[in-house]
Amino acid sequence: MAATAPLEIQVYAAFPRAVALGADLNVDPSNWHWVLCLTLPLETLDALQLSPRPYKWIRYAIGVVVGAQGDLSSSPDLPNLVDYDAGLPVESAVLYYHTSEEERRRMFPADPNTGHTRITSSVATTRRAQFRDDVAERDGRECVLSGMDEMACGAVHLLAHSKGDASRSRDPSGGDIVQDIDSVRNGLFLNKITHVSLGKDVAFLTTPNFAMNTSDIDPTVPPAEQRCTAHIFRPDTLSFFRIRGREMLPSGSPLQISDNPKWPPAILFDAVYAGAVLQHFGTQTLKDEVAAIWKDTFYPDGVNRKAEGFPDPAPGGWGVF
């Protein structure tokens, strides 16, 4: 008897066939084609419980991976929207992520190689020591997820290099751009147990965003409440260990966010979340497509290591200082 194919949701998005460095994307239909971006096993989505409204989460996930806001449809030709309030389907489904011409012009997808270009070092340079101290001070010298004290924590770079900053900005004033990798706005104070999985098996979802409000994550809170929610992407590990009190923090726990103007902009959290989505659900077709077409846009001058004393990237990637 033939094996039964696993039930899954396939998500396609339109990608340009060619990208010109420093120019708006050509939105002529002949320059665009559908690419299979995500395959989402229904069993995994059900186990992870990332949102009680899974179609809203899928819209957010494909949006941050593609780098453009849009809507989900069951048709490649007509944007007849899915029911965003529906639960998971009982059969496999195919969805298409439709974006406007304006969004296509400013599209900037997640770099599939981000996880391989993060910079790790034990070199205690003055610059990096200052980064750690600045991030610790802003975050109250305790882990923003677990509350662990300073001795068990480090300052983690959300993004360890700059690439195409202006293209990624969604703020007309450019206020969401972080030009310096050692800016306090590019860091979080996290316990060392969590940091090693950040961007791979762990990511933080900020709400409200273009696809979800906060009650789409936690129905008990007001829709407009500002929140940053920790998600684990491995069904076999759905809790964070907490040393203090030996508690288990479940996936879906909120970060202690700050109204400090030096708190990281949402676009950095989106980029890290996109990396985790790519890690677990991204297709090889998407990764090959983006790597081939967008390489010069991501790295026009190579990987930008702005901090002095940066060594070559180390395997496993995330730096804690």
Image (spheres, rainbow, N blue to C red):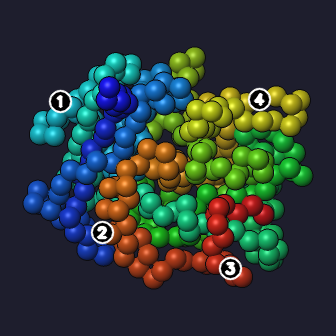
Residue 222 higher or lower than 155, as above or below = above
Do labels 3 and 1 touch, CB within 8 Å?
Answer: no
For residue 155, say whether it is visible.
yes
Marks 2 and 1, Cα distance to the nearest angstrom?
A: 29 Å
Q: Going 45% across and 39% down the picture, which residue do you hit?
A: 209
Q: Going 40% across and 36% down the picture, which residue do you hit?
A: 40
Tell me the crowding category of disc 2: few under 14, some 14 to 19, or many 20 or more residues within 10 angstroms, Cα based: some
Do labels 4 and 1 touch, CB within 8 Å?
Answer: no
Numbered circles on residues, count: 4
Classify residue 262 by image quadrant: bottom right
Q: From the viewer's perspective, tell me whether residue 115 is left or right of residue 321.
A: left
Q: Which residue is mark 2?
A: 293
Pick whichever of labels 3 and 1 is earlier in the sequence: 1
Marks 3 and 4, Cα distance to the nearest angstrom?
A: 36 Å
- Residue type highlighted by circle 4: Met
Position in image of residue 45 (x %, y %): 47, 29
- Residue type highlighted by circle 1: Asn
Pick whichever of labels 3 and 2 is earlier in the sequence: 2
The circle drawn on residue 80 is 1
Pick whichever of labels 2 and 4 is earlier in the sequence: 4
Q: From the viewer's perspective, tell me whether residue 284 is left or right of residue 143.
A: left
Query: For numbered disc 2, what is the local secondary structure?
Result: helix
Q: Which residue is mark 3?
A: 311
Look at discs 3 and 1 and give the one toward the viewer: 3
Marks 2 and 4, Cα distance to the nearest angstrom?
A: 43 Å
